[in-house]
Image (cartoon, helix red, strand yellow):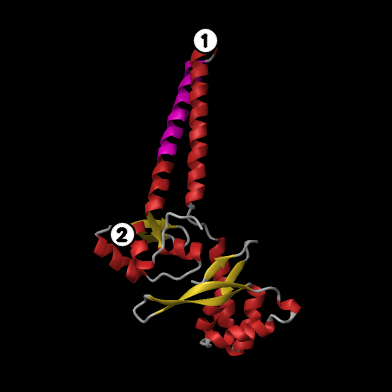
Amino acid sequence: MDLVNSNNGEVVITLKEITDLIKVQHSKAMKKVEKLAEEPSFGGLAKMDTPTYNPDGSINKMIETYVLNKKQAIAVGAKLNNKLLMKVIDRLEELEKAKSQPRELTRTELALMVIEAEKERERLQLENKELERTKAYISDKKTATAMATASAKSRENEKLKQQLDESLKYSTIRKQEARLGLKFPWRPLKKASEELGLKIKKIYDPLFERDLNSYHADAWLKAYGVDITKEY
C-alpha cells in the first residue's frame, strides 16, 4: 500500500494509489492536483517517491507522487472521477481502520524495553542484597517473593533481547511497507530467500490475526536493496 505516516498521526494516501484505484493516468492527475493546490483552502502539498512495477511484480522505476490527507484525497478523487469517488473513500476508511489496530513493535521500542527491563533487574538485585543484610527484620516469605520477582524479570529481559535480535534479522512485508511507504510484492523476496538458502519464518501479526511470512535481512537486500537493520 502507498501509505505514509504524517507528523500529526493522521492517515494520508498517495496520489499514485488513488489513480491506481480509479484508473486515471498519474501524470495528468499530478497537474490537476497542482491546479487544485492553487486554492489556499486545499492546503499544502508534499511529495515522495513511489515505485512502479513490471508485470512480474519487480520494481520498474521510481516516480514522484503527491501525499494527500483525507480532505485533499476526497477532493482529488471527485475531480478526477466522481463516479468512482466511493472507491477512494472506502480506501481511506480502510487505512484509518488499519492505523487504529495493534502494530508490531519497532526495533527502537524493543531496545527501550530491554533497557528498562535491565534497569529493573539491577534494581531488584540491589534490593535483594539489602534484604539479605536485613533479613532479621523481614520474613523468609518476603525474601523468597522478591527473589522470584527478580528471576521473572531476568527471564523477561532475556526474552526481549531475543525479540530485538530477531527483529534485526527478519521483517514482514507489512512492516516495511508501513515504514517506507512502498509496496513490496512477495515473489522477489521468496526467490531471493531460495537463492540464498535462507529460511522464511512465520511471525504473528495482530492486525491480520494470523501468521505472516517474515524474510531475512539478506533477502530484503538482494530483492529490493532495502536494509531492514537501519531506522529511517
The residue singled out by tag 2 in the image is: 200
Q: Residue at x 59, y 78 (%)?
A: 89
The picture places residue 13, in percent across and down from the top left corner, at 57, 73
Counting from the top left corner in percent of width and height, residue 201 is at 32, 57
Q: Report which quarter residue 95 is drawn in.
A: bottom right
| Residue at mark 1 | 136
Q: Quadrant of residue 210?
A: bottom left
Question: Overall secondary structure of the magenta stretch?
Answer: helix
Q: Answer whether residue 160 is visible to the viewer in this image.
A: yes
Give the magenta range. 139-158
* Left or right: 110 in relation to 73: left
Helix or strand or loop: what does disc 1 sit on?
Answer: helix
How crowded pointer 1 is (Cα within 10 Å; few <14, some 14-19, many 20+) is rated as few
In the drawing, does residue 203 fall left or right of residue 120?
A: left
Residue under the point 55% across and 77% down: 65
Q: Is residue 208 left or right of residue 198?
A: right
Residue 135 in the image: above or below residue 31:
above
Residue 78 visible in the displayed image: no
- Name, please, the residue furthest toward the top: 136
For the residue carrying disc 2, how many other residues have a C-alpha within 10 Å: few (<14), some (14-19), or many (20+)? some
* Amino acid type at image mark 1: Ala
**Percent x, y for residue 61?**
43, 77
Q: Amino acid at mark 2?
A: Ile
Q: Which mark is residue 70?
A: none
Q: Nearer the viewer, mark 1 or mark 2?
A: 2
Q: Which numbered disc flags the more N-terminal residue, 1 or 2?
A: 1
Q: Secondary structure at mark 2?
A: loop
State yes or no: residue 155 in magenta.
yes
What residue do we see at 53% from left, 76% from top? 64
